[in-house]
Image (cartoon, helix red, strand yellow):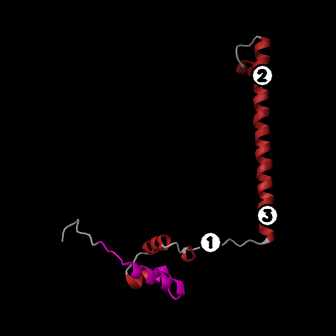
Amino acid sequence: MYKNDKVIRRYSEPFKLKILDELTTGKLNKYQLGKAYGIAPTTINEWIRKYNRKDLMNTRIKVETKDEITRIKALQKEIKQLKQLLLKKDLDALVLDSYLEVAAEQLGYKSVTELKKKLNI
C-alpha cells in the first residue's frame, strides 16, 4: 500500500439518518455511536448541521444563583468605576505635565527635567 492510498468513506443518506435517529433516542451519545460504527463524532456533528437537527447539538446552559448575579453586577460596576478613576488619573498626569511645560518655558528653563531638578521633584 502506498502513502497516498487513503480510504475515503462515503455514507449513504439512509445510514446518516439512521445514526441521527439513534442519537435522538438518547440511548447512545455521539461518542458511543462513533465507536460503534467507526465514525468520528465530528462527522456526526456535520450531519447534524447538514440535516438541520440543532436539537441534537450539545447545548450549554449557564445556571446562576441570585447571589452570583448580584456579585457579577457589583463587580461590573466596580470595574466601570476603576476605569473612570484610571482615566481621571491619566488626565491629571497629562495636565500636570502641561503645567510643568508652561512653567519651565516661562521661567526660562530648557526642559521640564531641568525644572524638576531645580525643584527636587
Callout in the foreground (3, 2): 3
Give whichever of discs 3 and 2 has the lower sequence position. Answer: 3
Query: Callout 2: few (<14), some (14-19), or many (20+) C-alpha neighbours within 10 Å?
Result: some
Give the structural element (helix, strand or loop) at label 3: helix
Asked which quadrant contains residue 1, the reply is: bottom left
Front residue of this view, candidates 64 and 47: 47
Residue 32: image location, x then y, percent: 46, 83
Where residue 100 is drawn, which disc sits there?
A: 2
Dominant SS of magenta comes to helix
* Circle 3 residue: 71
Vertical relation: 105 (above or below) 40? above
Residue 36: image location, x then y, percent: 40, 85
Give the structural element (helix, strand or loop) at label 1: loop
> Which residue type carries mark 3?
Arg
> Which residue type carries mark 1?
Arg
* Circle 1 residue: 60
Provide the residue span drawn in magenta: 8-32
Does residue 98 belong to the magenta stretch?
no
Q: In which quadrant is the C terminus drawn? A: top right
C-alpha gap between disc 3 and disc 1? 22 Å
Give whichever of discs 3 and 1 has the lower sequence position. Answer: 1
Front residue of this view, candidates 17 and 100: 17
* Residue at x 60%, y 73% (from the top left corner): 59
Vertical relation: 73 (above or below) 52? above
Callout in the foreground (3, 1): 1
Give the structural element (helix, strand or loop) at label 2: helix
Asked which quadrant contains residue 46, the reply is: bottom left
